[in-house]
Image (spheres, helix red, strand yellow):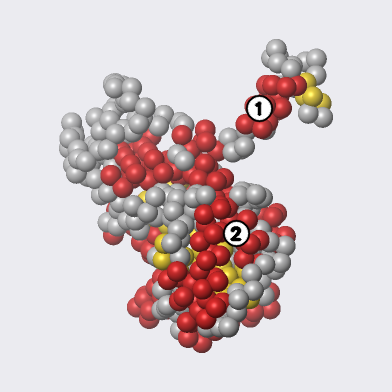
Amino acid sequence: MTFISTTMATDNGHLNDASPSAVDQTVVDAIAAAELYHSAGTTYLHIDNPLTSNSSASSNNDANPSGAVVPPISLATTFRQNTPGEPMARDDPNSWGLGYEYSRTGNPTRGVFERAVAAAEKTKYCVAFSSGSAATSAVIHLLSPGEKLLSIDDVYGGTQRYFRKVVNPRMGIDVDFVDFGNKDEVQSKLKSGGGKTKLFWLETPTNPTLKVTCIRSVAALAKEHNALLAVDNTFCSPYFQNPVEFGADIIVHSVTKYINGHSDVVMGVVCTNDEDVYKQLRFTQNGVGAVPSPFDCFLALRGLKTLHLRMEAAARYVDLNANAIALFLERQDSVSKVVYPGLKSHPQHEIATRQQNGYGAMITFYCVGGREQAAIILQNLRVFALAESLGAIESLAESPSLMTHASVPDEQRKLLGIDDTLIRLSVGVESCVDLISDLDSALNAALSSVGGK
């Protein structure tokens, strides 16, 4: 823990004589217990100069004269210039050194949100877009016709649809889908790519089967082939995983999910430490114009400030909602299989334990029976809402084969294990007892329909 390690000299958890603070072991233990969130709360709430969002800021005036503790919503579409072609407020950190001239190009509220997410992901740069899909598109704009993209096979339905139906046929970029855990398959695709593979696309855990991949291994492979590695980190959020620490070049989020966390904003971001990549992303953001509104940025920034609290409530390692629900589901006669990285039965449990700071709040399970039984379960839920999306404070349930992944070709869904009995849960922060009771009632209704208890 940073505070104890830097201000309280300790030996084996006990204060030593060199401690500069007049505290005893009771205080040290109390601080250790309170520091549940690994200082994340401070990072999310207090980035450097978070309130320098006055559009007229310059080196000659105070960037935050009001002293407001909450960044204001800047609705201006255009900004005054004292000299033609010379935007003001270049010294405002939220303008990323560009100043402000037109709100598509740069906006103070968007800038402070971008800087907050960059801090959360431990990267230098962040660029915000109007949706997660727009963020994905901006990354693809880094490629040129004739180059190749290597994507994980079990990928969000909207992403695979975009890759298959837009990127490949309309942009002239070949796309291969692979299991990055299958080294022979990956090497075969890279060999057939003839050195043209310039981007690896990874989700870990994947959507919806929660496959976990070693980011460090894929990053090393991408570097070996002079390619960039982009990791969609939506399912873990910056709180449970920071892909840049394992060698990823680009991190993508659907802000709509955990970062915002309240089912009231559609947005995406791309984070990176690579200055050249950042400049290209910023150019695409301005040129294509898929930017989020200032109000949405304000809401998403407010959501980010409680990310650590929400993730702890929904998905810490033991004794909280997601883990308890996964253990409950494993013991039900109406469930044939449960997939959750926190379970020892998960095939990549060890990778998740090593790579993530928590197992996440997404659970996939397969019910006994068929489509009819899955429908009975979903239609009998009362606390879980039957809805697409994920990562909000309220718990959600859906059928990927009929909803989020309906666009995946039937044969591919079969290979990935996305069948009609698969149900995806996004566990929220409601009472764990209420969530399990809700599932128990719905599962019993489905089991009765196939002659169970």
Q: Nearer the viewer, mark 1 or mark 2?
A: 2
Q: Residues within 10 Å of mark 1 (few under 14, many from 20)?
A: some
> In this image, 10 relative to 169: left or right?
right
Asked which secondary structure carries label 2, the reply is helix
Locate the C terminus and report the quarter of the image it occupies: bottom right
Tell me, for residue 325, which label it has, or none. 2
> Which residue lies most toward the top here?
22
> Residue 103's spot in the image, x, y percent?
24, 45
- Residue receiving disc 1: 31
Locate the N terminus and report the quarter of the image it occupies: top right
What amino acid type should be assigned to the residue bearing mark 1? Answer: Ile
Q: Nearer the viewer, residue 310 or 118?
A: 310
Tell me, for residue 241, which label it has, or none. none
Quadrant in the picture for residue 256: bottom left
Residue 172 showing in the rendered view: no
At x 39% / y 40%, what residue is drawn?
A: 302
Q: Nearer the viewer, residue 271 or 407?
A: 407
Q: Nearer the viewer, residue 71 or 134?
A: 71
Residue 364 showing in the rendered view: yes
In the rendered view, tell whether residue 46 sits above or below residue 147.
above
Quadrant in the picture for residue 72: top left
In the rendered view, tell whether residue 11 sits above or below residue 309.
above
> In this image, 164 relative to 362: left or right?
left
> In the rendered structure, which disc, 1 or 2, sits on the residue that comes first in sequence?
1
What amino acid type should be assigned to the residue bearing mark 2? Answer: Ile
> Which residue lies most toward the front here?
453
The number of discs equals: 2
